[in-house]
């Protein structure tokens, strides 16, 4: 009986180590998928910088403007062959909807008022391109 316990001990340690490493890898994969390269967030940050909107305001408008996942929408745009100009114009109506919904929910805010002209320009370009 003593010999069986001694041979089982190292196997239990290795099994626990393997389970721990697998759990850590799963956790890393989860966070990578949420905020890594393929999440769309990095592409959204590039669009925000390109059009001159602070990142936090851009992502807040996207969250309120899109039905579903804004990151999935951004990831889809990132995978398409559109350049930043085209993707920015394509997001104009979504950002405008985000402004409308945010103002309805929270009232007028200075940070949103500052980006209205930029979003209005994108919406006008979107309408012209249709």
Image (cartoon, rainbow, N blue to C red):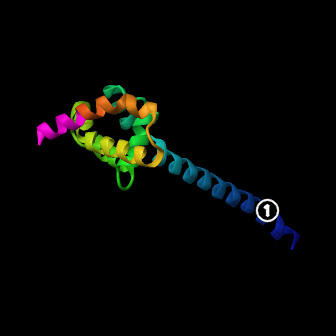
2 relative to 55, above or below: below
Residue reaching furthest to the right: 2
Which residue corresponds to mark 1?
A: 9
Secondary structure predominantly adopted by residues drawn in magenta: helix
Q: Is residue 31 found left or right of 113 in the rendered image?
A: right
Quarter of the image for the N terminus: give it.
Answer: bottom right
Which of 117 and 72 lies nearest the eye of the viewer?
Answer: 117
Residue 127 on the magenta span: yes
Residue 123 position by quadrant: top left
Give how far across and how far down residue 36 sits, in percent: 46, 41
Q: How many marks?
A: 1
Residue 50 on the magenta span: no
Which of 20 and 57 lies nearest the eye of the viewer?
Answer: 57
Which of 4 and 83 lies nearest the eye of the viewer?
Answer: 83
Q: Is residue 19 found left or right of 78 in the rendered image?
A: right
Residue 120 position by quadrant: top left
Give how far across and how far down residue 59 sits, in percent: 42, 40
Residue 115 visible in image? yes
- How crowded pointer 1 is (Cα within 10 Å; few <14, some 14-19, many 20+) is rated as few
Residue placed at 26% from the left, 39% from the top?
A: 92
Residue 41 position by quadrant: top left
Quarter of the image for the C terminus: give it.
Answer: top left
Residue placed at 31% from the left, 28% from the top?
A: 51
Q: Is residue 97 found left or right of 64 in the rendered image?
A: left
The local secondary structure at tag 1 comes to helix
Give how far across and how far down residue 76 sits, in percent: 30, 47
Q: Which residues are magenta?
A: 122-130
Give how far across and how far down residue 9 sits, in percent: 79, 62
Residue 41 visible in image? no
């Amino acid at each position: 009986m003593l010999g069986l316990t001694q041979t089982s001990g190292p196997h239990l340690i290795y099994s626990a180590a393997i389970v721990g490493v697998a759990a850590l890898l799963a956790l890393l994969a989860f966070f990578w998928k949420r905020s890594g390269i393929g999440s769309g967030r990095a592409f959204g940050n590039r669009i925000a910088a390109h059009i001159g909107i602070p990142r936090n305001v851009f992502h807040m408008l996207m969250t309120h403007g899109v039905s579903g996942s804004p990151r999935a929408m951004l990831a889809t745009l990132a995978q398409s062959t559109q350049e930043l100009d085209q993707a920015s114009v394509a997001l104009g109506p979504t950002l405008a909807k985000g402004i409308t919904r945010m103002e309805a929910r929270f009232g007028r805010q200075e940070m949103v008022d500052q980006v209205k002209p930029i979003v209005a320009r994108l919406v006008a370009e979107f309408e012209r391109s249709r």
